[in-house]
Image (cartoon, rainbow, N blue to C red):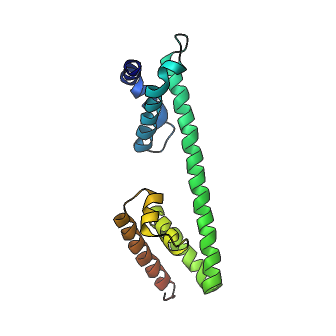
């Protein structure tokens, strides 16, 4: 079984990678999904294909499914980001009033996504840095740094708009 998957990898990795790369925005994402396709191949190639089905065709089908999974995951992340933005607006209006809510929302939107997520998880959801690290897939130290830098940026943005936090 491993021999067949290994042979498929040697013969078809480049083709599968190029197929994914044309459909994804970065080399990194294409490499990651290609690896996942060949992990699936190592697990199921013998059981999933017969002599009638070319291995490359099966690999393209697996790659297409991985692309669909990836697209769903991105859509979920975007939906979560929109929900977090709505929650920021509601909490800010409730706690600070509408005059602060909009500048705060704009300041948070300007943060890099990784910083914004950590700030929202810490400030609005009240998670510990250990829980945040587990959720975002980073170390606690990285999350603490993102949080500190994010707050510093938000504070500077609010001061530029004439609001002192």
Rendered position, 61 above or below 90 = above
Does 68 sit above or below residue 103?
above
Q: Residue at x 55, y 32 (%)?
A: 64
* Percent position of residue 145, x then y: 36, 69
- Tally of numbered discs: 0
State which quadrant residue 115 falls in: bottom left
Residue 3 relative to residue 16: left or right: left
Q: At which x and y percent is residue 124? A: 55, 73
Could you tell me which residue is drawn at 51 percent across and 88 percent down? 163
Q: Nearer the viewer, residue 93 or 128?
A: 128
Observer able to see residue 122 = yes
Vertically, is 58 above or below 99?
A: above
In the rendered view, tell whether residue 114 sits above or below residue 30. Answer: below
Closest to the observer, 139 or 9: 139
Task: Pick the residue in front: 94 or 16.
Answer: 94
Residue 54, position as x, y percentages in the image: 51, 15
Can you say which quadrant of the picture contains the N terminus?
top left
Residue lying at 51% horizontally and 84% vertically, measured from the top left: 161
Looking at the image, which is closer to me, 19 or 130? 130
Q: Residue furthest top?
A: 51
Tell me if I can see residue 18 in this picture.
Answer: no
Quadrant in the rendering for residue 93 = bottom right
- Residue 142: quarter of image: bottom left
- Which residue appears at 54% of the width and 21% of the height? 48
- Tell me: 129 left or right of 47: left
């Amino acid at each position: 079984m491993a021999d067949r998957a290994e042979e498929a990898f040697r013969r078809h990795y480049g083709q599968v990678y190029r197929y994914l790369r044309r459909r994804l925005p970065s080399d990194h994402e294409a490499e990651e999904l290609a690896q996942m396709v060949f992990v699936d191949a190592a697990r199921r190639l013998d059981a999933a294909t017969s002599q009638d089905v070319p291995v490359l065709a099966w690999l393209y089908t697996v790659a297409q499914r991985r692309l669909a999974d990836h697209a769903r995951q991105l859509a979920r992340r975007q939906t979560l980001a929109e929900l977090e933005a709505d929650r920021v607006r509601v909490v800010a209006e409730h706690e600070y009033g509408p005059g602060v809510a909009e500048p705060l929302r704009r300041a948070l939107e300007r943060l890099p996504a990784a910083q914004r997520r950590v700030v929202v998880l810490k400030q609005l959801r009240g998670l510990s840095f250990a829980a945040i690290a587990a959720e975002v897939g980073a170390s606690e130290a990285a999350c603490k740094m993102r949080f500190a830098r994010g707050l510093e940026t938000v504070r500077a943005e609010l001061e530029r708009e004439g609001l002192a936090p």
